[in-house]
Amino acid sequence: MFLFRKIIAVTVVMFFSLALTSCEKAQPSSASLRAGEKRATIAPEYFTGKAYKAYFAAKEIPEVLDSLYCYCDCAKHAGHLSLLTCFVSMHGQGCDVCMDEAIMAYELHQQGKDILSIRKAVDEKFAR
């Protein structure tokens, strides 16, 4: 009888531990946020001013920009995978939204923010 109670107690503890663990919200890893843009960005040296800064950001932190949605909605009208896609073509140099997002992401990255924090800040600023 004692052994039976012990088995029941262990089973109940394991059940509740498993239930609590599965209820915790899992944070996505930064790798799982990547859209998968594989093409190289255009060299920033081809641009000046704001466009230079944005293309520089894309060159320096492609993994961050590939984890961000571009709020000019180029994913819908041009089939872009992520903000990074804007900088593998000339699209980024003609779009203030793309450039502003990239520059903001770069500045936050320079401050030591992780991809999830950068994504949250960009979403809060640019989402309609």
Image (tube, rainbow, N blue to C red):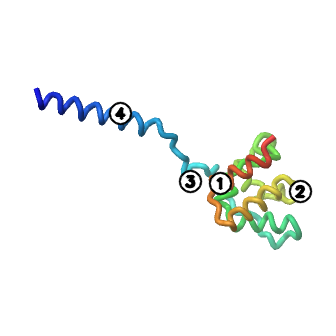
Residue occupying the point 55% across, 47% down? 28
Q: Which mark is residue 94?
A: 2
Q: Nearer the viewer, mark 2 or mark 1?
A: 1
Residue occupying the point 74% across, 51% down? 122
In the image, residue 126 sits, relative to residue 3, either above or below, namely below
Neighbor class of circle 1 (other Cα within 10 Å; few <14, some 14-19, many 20+) is some
Q: Position of residue 66 (x, y in %)?
A: 67, 54
In the image, residue 118 sits, relative to residue 46, either above or below, namely above
Give the side of residue 107 with respect to residue 100, left or right: left
Q: Which residue is denoted by mark 3 in the rendering?
A: 31
Circles 1 and 3 in contact, beta carbons < 8 Å: no
- Most distant residue in the bottom direction: 45
Q: Nearer the viewer, mark 1 or mark 3?
A: 1
Badge 2 marks a residue whose secondary structure is: helix
Q: CA distance from mark 2 to mark 4?
A: 55 Å
Q: CA distance from mark 2 to mark 1?
A: 27 Å
